[in-house]
């Protein structure tokens, strides 16, 4: 990855920041995008301490103009793009019956449309370099999770989009990876939205028992280097995908029971 150009959305914290640090250790030029300007520049300073070139671009991926600007600034600074990692995302935690529709729209705007916008403007440059498009997805893209209708919907949509993109460009050298980290210690649960669109504030899970963002970043970077199509992490994640393929009704019950055990779960 020496002197390659990697764009990472949602790069101010969690997996996104860990990916930026991981690619910095591999000698890549890193473009970091996020909505929070202060946190983004703090993260960018940390990454640039590795001695690589870092470009920080304040970006709300749900806004098409911001995504276009992100790609344009990356090209202006570095002249090309080798890897686009669509990592920006938010979650939710509420029953659909109780959820304002604006919450679903917000999740789709960031998790799905943000990926579409960035990929649209980056694609011509990625085809030139035979580069990689990556979607940081979730087990929720394979199995619907109760209390996460908008989140699961956005990840299922991501899978369909990226799979189609891969097939359309299979003779043009484009690499497409769908990466599902499983439960990872990051702030996505802390920033999950409730039924009214307010930030939840606390994670309902024990973050200390999860795979670290840094470990996830290493796995994702290695999968990109090997040009893998799919990456599913954690034993629980892999087991869920396999069992759901063959025993979907059984997994419906298992997922329901598992999610119902969360503290203050909306599932009763």
Image: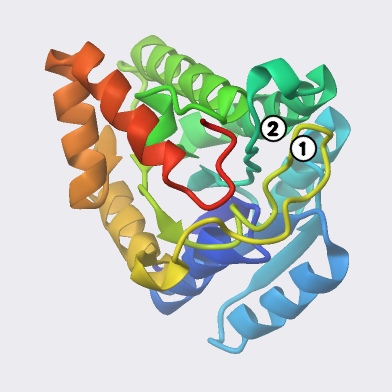
Give the farthest residue toward the front: 268
Residue drawn at 35 percent across, 34 percent down:
257
Residue drawn at 40 percent across, 10 percent down:
168
Label 2's element?
helix
116 is higher (above) or lower (below) than 247: below
The residue indicated by pointer 2 is 114
The residue indicated by pointer 1 is 67
Label 1's element?
helix
Residue drawn at 43 percent across, 22 percent down:
144
User: Which sits in the foreground, 174 or 36?
Assistant: 36
155 is higher (above) or lower (below) than 215: above
Which of pointers 2 and 1 indicates the residue nearer the eye?
2
Question: Where is residue 1 drawn, in percent x and y?
Answer: 38, 63
Q: Which of marks 2 and 1 is nearer the N terminus?
A: 1
Q: Report whether 80 appears left or right of 214.
A: right
Residue 132 visible within the image: no
Within-10-Å neighbours for mark 2: few <14, some 14–19, many 20+: many
Contact between labelled residues 1 and 2, with CB atoms less than 8 Å apart: yes
């Amino acid at each position: 990855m020496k002197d390659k150009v990697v764009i990472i959305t949602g790069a101010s914290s969690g997996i996104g920041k860990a990916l930026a640090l991981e690619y910095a250790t591999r000698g890549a030029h890193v473009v970091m995008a996020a909505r929070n300007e202060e946190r983004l520049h703090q993260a960018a300073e940390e990454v640039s301490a590795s001695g690589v070139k870092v470009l920080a671009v304040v970006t709300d991926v749900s806004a098409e103009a911001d995504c276009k600007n992100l790609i344009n600034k990356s090209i202006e600074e570095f002249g090309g793009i080798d890897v686009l990692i669509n990592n920006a995302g938010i979650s939710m935690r509420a029953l659909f019956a109780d959820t304002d529709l604006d919450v679903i729209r917000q999740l789709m705007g960031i998790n799905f449309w943000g990926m579409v916008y960035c990929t649209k403007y980056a694609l011509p440059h990625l085809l030139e370099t035979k580069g990689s498009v990556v979607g940081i997805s979730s087990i929720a893209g394979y199995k619907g999770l109760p209390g996460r209708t908008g989140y699961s919907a956005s990840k299922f949509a991501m899978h369909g989009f990226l799979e189609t993109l891969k097939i359309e460009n299979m003779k043009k050298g484009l690499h497409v990876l769908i990466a599902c980290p499983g439960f990872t210690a990051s702030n996505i649960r802390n920033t999950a939205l409730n039924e009214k669109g307010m930030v939840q504030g606390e994670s309902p899970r024990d973050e200390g028992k999860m795979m670290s963002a840094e470990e996830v970043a290493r796995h994702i970077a290695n999968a990109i280097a090997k040009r893998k199509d799919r990456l599913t992490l954690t034993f629980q994640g892999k087991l869920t995908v396999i069992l759901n393929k063959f025993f979907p009704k059984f997994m419906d019950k298992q997922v329901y029971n598992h999610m119902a055990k969360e503290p203050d779960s909306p599932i009763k």
